[in-house]
Amino acid sequence: MRLGANLIIGGALFALAVIVGLLAPWLAHTDPVMDANLLNAEEPPSWIWWFGTDAQGRDIYSRVVHGARISLTVGIVSQLVNSVIGVTLGLTAGYWGGWWDDFVNGLTNLMLAIPSLIFALAIMAVLGPGLTSLLIALGLTNWSFTCRIARASTLSLKSQGYVQAAKVLGYGDLRIMITQLLPNMVGPIIVIGTLGMGGAILAEAALSFLGLGVRPPYPSWGSMLSEARDQITTAPWLSIFPGLAIFLTVLGLNLLGDGLRDILDPQSRSRRT
Amino acid sequence: MTGPPLLEVEDLRIDLNYRSSHVAAVEGVSFRIDRGETFGLVGESGCGKSITALALIGLLRQPLSIGAGAIRFDGREIQRLSAAEQRALRGNRIAMIFQEPMTALNPVSPVGRQIAEMFVLHQGKDWREANRLAVEALASVRVPAPERRVKDYPHQLSGGMRQRVMIAIALACGPDLLIADEPTTALDVTVQAEIIELMRNLCAERGTAILMISHDLGLVANVCRRVAVMYAGRIVEERGSDDIFRTSSHPYTQGLVDSLPRLGSRAALGRTRLTEIAGVVPAITDFPDGCRFNPRCARATDICRTTEPETTLLSAGGLVRCHHHA
Ligand SMILES: Nc1ncnc2c1ncn2[C@@H]1O[C@H](COP(=O)(O)OP(=O)(O)OP(=O)(O)O)[C@@H](O)[C@H]1O
Ligand code: SF4
Ligand SMILES: [Mg+2]
């Protein structure tokens, strides 16, 4: 099996982000919040301050490294919530059909009609800013694609011999869904999930940029961008490095998603075997 | 033997429901299978064999439904059972194997797990015990090195091996009845013979009755003690397998018998062309009036075109549905 370039580059970028996030306390040079020092405010990048410092003299490198934790937490947790909601709704709707299917379809269409960022904004406005509300807002608003994929997969898998066979063997609905349907749709669900994670990281950045996400002084990449916007001409490194971190992580996730699609796609899989 | 027969089908009708109307895809079908007996259902494609089998296990779904008649398994009427009671029968006391061993196994689950699932589901075993029993079940269908094979995925197995796994799954819980719907059509001839032999031996050892469904009269007569021939949704003749070649009474059965290649006889000697039954099976929506076989029947007379024949008991044993049976 030949692994695509997408998979390797994307996987490497995402792995890098995860490793940086995990090892943040050891990789960072200073404490990202406490180590403010006005004596070295707005230093440009140098051997001492790899990514420069901000107006309070905090090390941007250390803040970007710690920001990885927040951005990845938001990306992974909110996408997990989305996947669970989307798969549960899509699988049951496709399997049972009837009024439940109509209801889920209506809900999905509603979610697709309203841009999810606007939806998340509304939820944030109610819940107030902060990491927990961010996770709730992003976790509840991005399941429609997963739901559609899960429903479509269920509809096509339902007529497969092994699903029919399971009924003949006395499997109940839940057992059929868990053993016969779910494992046969994980491929596309993981692909959508990977792409969705990138989307969630971007959404976190956008919401934090608007002042609704993670609040300063805690460093998320989005909140760093938000703080840096007034100094974009005088101290561009304040925006460049968190921006680059977002860009590379989201790019990595998108490439990874595409690469995974190539190997997990049932069609390309059956071509190989 | 005392007690009710294992399976008793009485005057079964299966409706194919359109918007407001419905047509009978299967009608007036009756037969019974005793414990440990082997019974065959033969007929051309589309005559209603598979939907009859689905009705037996309570799995007909719209647009098909049971219109009339009764199906009694071990004295209990299937239609009267709750969904949960039906589920407890399926796979446990009535098992079924299909035509397509390629697709009847879950591609992402090791075969051992799929066998073990049956012990967990129907016998409440824990997974450790179930996995152990799965190895035994694989060994019983003569899969070599079963303790290694349980970890294989279906795509790692040949068609014949997969069908063995299907048999292991079907027989896992020691069912009373095994329904085999075209179990070997997808396999090549030598493998086919092995699988049939295996199925027959295992069922004989365990006293499991077989309902074998096929379009191949020769195959069915070989495996089963009694054979019912189905045409356009009706059973037209039921005979002991030994009689059916020598003394079949219904023109359709006789046509089937004549279309069989016989080793050492005509086919081998004179390479005479096999007789085929002229014409095609009528579509379910326009069965002809009278006897459904009349447009294709050489013996047909006026009464055949107007009046549906009743079932006649033959003195030699068996049943036939024909005005002019031999
Ligand atoms: N789900 C369905 N919807 C509509 N018609 C159906 C459905 N299933 C079966 N039928 C029709 O019912 C009739 C009997 O079908 P069945 O599958 O029992 O045939 P069969 O005897 O098993 O044929 P084969 O040898 O091809 O398997 C056919 O005419 C078929 O078109
Ligand atoms: S009833 Fe008439 S048409 Fe039907 S099989 Fe007998 S002879 Fe032929
Ligand atoms: Mg069939």
Image (cartoon, rainbow, N blue to C red):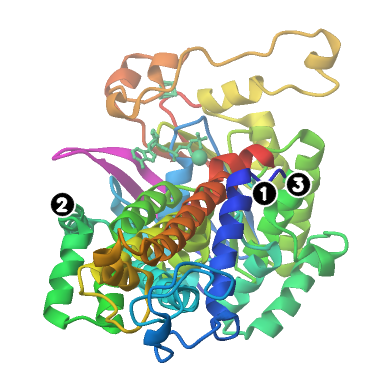
Query: Could you tell me the amino acid type at mark 3?
Result: Gly
Residue B22 inside the magenta-drawn segment:
yes
Count how many numbered circles sit on residues in the image: 3
Q: Nearer the viewer, residue A148 or B320?
A: A148
Which residue is painted at 41% across and 65% down in the image?
Answer: A242
Distance, label 2 to label 3, CA atoms, is 51 Å
Q: Secondary structure at mark 1?
A: loop
In which quadrant of the rendered image does the N terminus of chain B lie? Answer: bottom right
Which residue carries the number 1 mark? B225
Q: Nearer the viewer, residue A272 or A3?
A: A3
Q: Is residue A139 above or below residue B217?
A: below
Q: Secondary structure at mark 3?
A: helix
Letter of the chain that mark 3 sits on in the rendering = B
Residue A113 is tagged as 2
- Occupied quadrant, residue B170: bottom right
Dots 2 and 3: beta carbons under 8 Å? no
Which residue carries the number 3 mark? B160
- On whether disc 1 and disc 3 are found on a single subunit, the reply is yes
Give the mark toward the camera: 2 or 3: 2
The quarter of the picture showing ligand 1: top left
Residues in magenta, as a range:
B9-31
- Occupied quadrant, residue B147: bottom right
Dots 1 and 3: beta carbons under 8 Å? no
Which residue is painted at 82% across and 7% down in the image?
Answer: B270
Letter of the chain that mark 1 sits on in the rendering = B
Q: Judge left or right: residue B275 versus residue A110.
A: right
Which residue is painted at 55% across and 86% down in the image?
Answer: A25
Q: Is residue B20 above or below residue A223?
A: above
